[in-house]
Amino acid sequence: MQEHGGHVPEDKVQYLVKTPYGRGLVVRSRIDPHLDGTIKSRELELLDWKNLPSENDTNSASAARLVRSGPVRPATLFSSADFPSIDPEEQNDVETPYGRGRVTAMRPETNQVVVRISSWRLAGRSTVTCHLNKNVVNVVRSKQIYEMSTIEKIEYAQELKQEANRLFSGKRYQDALQFYAKAVDAVRYVQHKADSTNEMRADLLVVMVTCSNNAATSCTKLHQWDEAEKFARNALVLMDALEDKHGKRIHGILLKDGFPDIKLFGEWRVKSCIVIARALAEKSSTEDAIASLKKAHSFIEKYTGEENIKNTSLQSSIKQLQSLEREIKKLHKACLERRKVERKMERKRAQAMFGAKNATPKEDEKKDGNFSNNPSKLPKLSAPGLEDGNPVTKHSAKTCSPSIRSVRSDVSEKSTQSLRGDLKRRVSFATKIDDRDDDKDAASDVLEWYQDSEVLIGLAIFAGMALTTFVGLNYFLFSPKR
């Protein structure tokens, strides 16, 4: 560390130590340039300092000083003493003789701690675990996101995802959404460097896709349709980009990790398409919703062929796709009903425009339940399900790190609002969806205005009268005078 004039920057590694006044955080260390790098003094922030004026104590003189001087800064201690480290606990970040790591277990009978090294790795994803005496490890402050390396951000996002899955299982959808969103934000702007391995890139892709899909599913539970569509489209874009790199290194790593094409390009993309379709349908974009459902159905047809069905190792994904196909049929049927009503209303309006009999669009809207303007008439669908996937690292944290606990403390413990009740309209669906351009199964019984005989006769009479008038005027105005 070097002197920087009057200002000394904060230490990159900040130790947690024992002081006579409780726990302290070494914020800055000042070096004596004349003593070969010896630390001249340390600036410590006292974390347990209790002798501060209370904001609730309005009668004390110290409280009056607090009001006049504004917010109280943390108590600071300047000392040249080398205070010992605090006792390590599970999930603490520590510095060891072999690098920085995290305590994963305590061995009080042998006065040892188990530390998983995080500052470096062996080939691939192999991590190093050390069993060390408590006296040789020093507890340090956990890193902020901007201080983390690429692999640390990925591991942090994976821990957030585990906590979000737990919250989702407990039907705390709003809290789960916050954790999924934080996981996505943690790795959204990762900048790969020369030392970033293909394994890191593959892990990054998996955590981004699964957390985006899971966040979209949480949004559907909360009826946040715009956010659901954004998260699902984000996952779909990533999977489409991976498909463009089909057969290359990252795709090969994912295959080795237990992510076959049927899961990557079938199951995950179908879930994204279903969420997008549901969001579009709720926003009355019926045609776009049907297009998204057709896209999802094409993925199912592609990856549920006879070859994959015979493969016993793919049966879990096959069953998942079959379950998703039922959801597609249910939503597809509802969208077709809505489109049928919309087209019927268009025909009624056209008949009213040309003076056809019995043209009462408003009455028809009441009769048909005003389907086109009431998204709640869509059937209630079950969520596509969470993306958990196979573990992408050989390490699985049993508990959350201190940074995770700090995130959890910011999340409200109140349960989310109850979802809307079961909808009265129930729909049935055919055993197979015919992927046709015009969807004749939905509109075969609806005549367009140009197919109605009464409207065509009226148009013919109107055109004949107009033609006769034109010919007559032309004769009287332009015929030669006799």
Image (cartoon, rainbow, N blue to C red):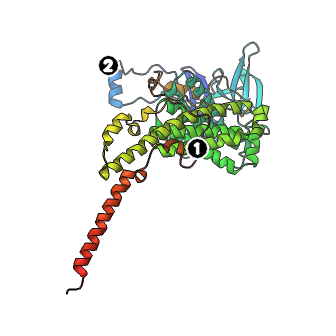
Whole-number angstrom distance, CA of label 1 to CA of label 2: 67 Å
Query: In the image shown, does 2 or 313 lie closer to the viewer?
Result: 313
The type of residue carrying mark 2 is Thr
Report the disc number at residue 294: 1
Q: Quadrant of residue 395?
A: top right
Relative to 221, does residue 208 appear above or below in the rendering?
Answer: below
Report the disc number at residue 480: none
The type of residue carrying mark 1 is Lys
Relative to 76, does residue 337 appear above or below in the rendering?
Answer: below
Query: In the image shown, does 162 or 1 lie closer to the viewer?
Result: 162
The image position of residue 365, as x and y in percent, is: 35, 38
User: Is residue 12 visible to the viewer in this orientation of the structure?
Assistant: no
| Count of numbered circles on the image | 2
The image position of residue 464, as x and y in percent, is: 32, 64
Task: Please tell me which residue is depicted at 29% across the width and 66% down the height of the picture.
Answer: 466
How would you rate the neighbour count of disc 1 (Cα within 10 Å): few for under 14, some for 14-19, many for 20 or more?
many
Q: Mark 1, mark 2: which one is toward the viewer?
A: 1
Report the disc number at residue 58: 2
